[in-house]
Image (tube, helix red, strand yellow):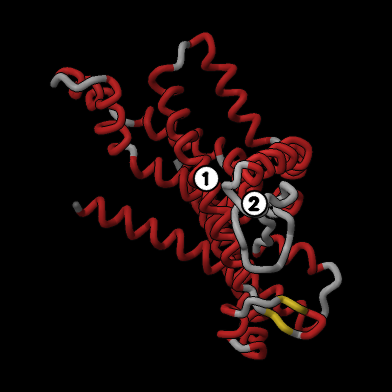
């Protein structure tokens, strides 16, 4: 009995140390970012840094507003493309998929999560960029748009990121749907509801916390993705002029220039990381408030 009690106390200590290590890691990241980024914002001017539309490090002009808008556009496009497909796929896998094809489909979605970002980027360069370029030229020829661009654009990056966030959304949403008690579904059918109505009006609302968690994880993946976006987005540090035009995101701005940045330029890039970190905090905080409000209802 004594040995068992000692083992339990020891494991409790191990778990506590692991939890403290996670909290410490987050705290160290926060301290590093804010300690190096806030002074740069003060020197540049918070307003000029956030709302400035020009990024010219050689002239010590640091305005990240185009990158903020670019990140929002690309992430929003990925959500519009990836979230509906991911949720519908998870519904199919949980309620409609035949057993013969479930395992291959599940393996395929899991494989999507294991593909490196650079491979996605190569796929985007070789396949998506030419397709979007030809599509834009067709629209321009029809008089729908004025300029078609070269294929490296917001639309291309959104399509690619929409593909990249699919496994995260599918896996989390499917697990959430399967966790809903079967009595909910069976009771809805017994009351005369159709299968589709039972799924979308009963099961998905019951699994909303898991669905929202999957969406938030997908947003985090999309807004934090770097390599694939660099390869297909065009990397133009200017205000976005349309979905067929190039754009630079916050993450791409940091990666592209951090290798040779010094002094205030380097600190400005770290401050860009602070802005990105705050975006993620705002998203998580908003979702937490949304869940809390729905739970109270």
Residue situated in front as seen by the camera: 108 or 17? 108
- Mark 2 surroundings within 10 Å by alpha-carbon count, few (fewer than 14), some (14 through 19), many (20 or more): many
Mark 1 or 2, closer to the camera: 2
Residue situated in front as seen by the camera: 173 or 222? 222
Residue 118: image location, x then y, percent: 76, 44
Q: What residue is rendered at 33% in x and 60% in y?
A: 289
Which residue is the site of mark 2? 244
Q: Is residue 254 above or below residue 79?
A: below
Lower position in the chain sequence, tag 1 or tag 2: 1
Q: Quadrant of residue 290?
A: bottom left
Residue 221: image location, x then y, percent: 58, 50
Seen from this angle, which residue lies furthest right? 260
Residue 143: image location, x then y, percent: 60, 47
Residue 262: image location, x then y, percent: 82, 79
Quarter of the image that includes the N terminus: top left
Judging from the image, what secondary structure is the residue with disc 2 in? Answer: loop
Q: CA distance from mark 1 to mark 2?
A: 61 Å
Q: Is residue 84 above or below residue 65?
A: above
Q: What residue is rendered at 61% in x and 78% in y?
A: 34
């Amino acid at each position: 009995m004594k040995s068992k009690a000692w083992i339990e106390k020891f494991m409790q200590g191990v778990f506590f140390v692991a939890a403290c290590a996670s909290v410490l890691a987050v705290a160290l990241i926060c301290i590093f970012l804010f300690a190096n980024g806030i002074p740069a914002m003060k020197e540049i001017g918070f307003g000029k840094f956030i709302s400035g539309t020009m990024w010219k490090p050689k002239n010590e002009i640091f305005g990240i507003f185009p990158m903020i808008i670019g990140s929002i556009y690309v992430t929003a496009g990925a959500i519009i493309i990836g979230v509906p497909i991911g949720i519908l796929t998870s519904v199919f896998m949980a309620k409609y998929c035949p057993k013969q094809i479930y395992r291959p489909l599940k393996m395929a979605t899991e494989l999507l999560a294991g593909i490196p970002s650079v491979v996605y980027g190569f796929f985007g360069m070789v396949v998506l960029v030419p397709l979007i370029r030809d599509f834009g030229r067709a629209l321009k020829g029809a008089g729908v748009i004025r300029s078609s661009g070269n294929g490296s654009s917001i639309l291309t990056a959104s399509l690619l990121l929409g593909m990249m966030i699919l496994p995260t959304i599918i896996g989390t949403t499917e697990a959430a749907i399967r966790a809903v008690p079967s009595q909910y579904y069976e009771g809805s059918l017994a009351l005369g509801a159709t299968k589709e109505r039972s799924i979308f009006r009963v099961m998905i609302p019951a699994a909303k916390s898991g669905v929202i968690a999957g969406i938030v994880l997908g947003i985090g993946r999309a807004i934090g993705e770097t390599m694939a976006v660099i390869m297909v987005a065009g990397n133009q540090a200017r205000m976005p002029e349309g979905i067929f035009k190039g754009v630079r995101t916050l993450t791409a701005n940091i990666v592209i220039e951090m290798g040779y940045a010094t002094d205030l330029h380097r600190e400005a890039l770290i401050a860009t990381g602070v802005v990105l970190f705050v975006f993620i905090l705002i998203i998580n905080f908003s979702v937490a408030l949304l869940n809390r409000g729905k739970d109270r209802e």
